[in-house]
Amino acid sequence: MAGLLVLWDIDYTLVEADGVGRRLYEMAFAELYGRPLAIAPTEVSMAGRTDRAISMDVLRLAGVPDPRGEVGRFEAALTRLAPAVADLVAATGRALPGAAAALTAIAALAGRAGPRQSVLTGNVRALAAAKLAPLGLAPLLNLDVGAYGDEHEVRAELVHLARRRSAAAYGRRFDGEGTVLVGDTPLDVHAAKATGARAVAVATGHFTAGQLAAAGADAVLADLTDTGQVLSAVLGR
């Protein structure tokens, strides 16, 4: 039996936690290499990318030999240290307007065969939890079936992983447009298109509605504040 799997991006789609990711990178780098991470924020593009891809760029720019060989150790440090930034998220982060209502509305439809929802994020899982839990969003998502940025450097590959986990958990398949990606970057859209999923883009990040439409999104929303509109876009009505 087929079902509907809704996979949410986190940063600038569900939450705004400016500075938390970079702070975690600084903490991990200092712990591993005994020196500050002296890279300007503009030197590494993060929008829509996975922590694996970002980590390799950071290590290369910081002059660490063999960045690809070091990335596993760096990701382990990110995972170990991520719980320490949860207080920073609680103090300075925020759920984006309408995010909680949208997640709640979809969760209410779940029933026996309704939509399931999780995350498809560039964050390592521990950082995803550290961003979602303090803002009250984690209970609305099954994080066990999501896919995370330390599991592959290519975002589209994470879609296959989330589908396999969800099929095992729920006993049904989420092929093709049975999967919906909701995100705020062209890379979210490209991941959906590359895997036959539907793409719902939200212009709450650094990209305009026009840029997201040009990337091929099936639906583009200004934000998540109109819950009915979000439901229509996600459910393909």
Image: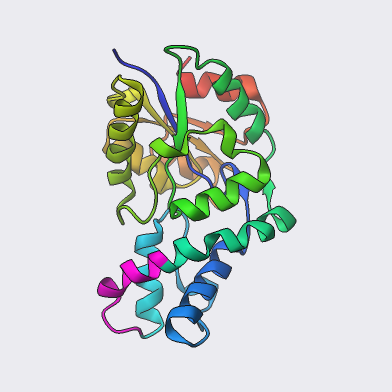
Residue at image location 43% in from the left, 80% down from the top: 32
Q: Relative to 189, does residue 108 appear above or below in the rendering?
A: above
The part of the image, by quadrant, that contains residue 215 is top left
Q: Residue at x 66, y 39 (%)?
A: 136
> To which quarter of the image does residue 13 belong?
top right
- Image mark count: 0
The percent position of residue 9, horizontal first and vertical second, equals 48, 43
Asked whether residue 46 is in view, the answer is yes
- Residue 96: which quarter of the image? top right
Indicate yes or no whether the magenta region holds residue 125.
no
| In this rendering, position of residue 45 left or right of residue 13 | left
Range shown magenta: 64-76
58 relative to 204, above or below: below
Residue 98, image x and y in percent?
A: 67, 33
Q: Residue at x 51, y 84 (%)?
A: 38
| Rendered-image quadrant of the N terminus | top left
Q: Residue at x 48, y 45 (%)?
A: 211
Is 101 situated left or right of 80 in this image?
A: right
Residue 18 or 44: which is nearer the viewer?
18
Query: For the view shown, which residue lies furthest in the right direction?
Result: 91
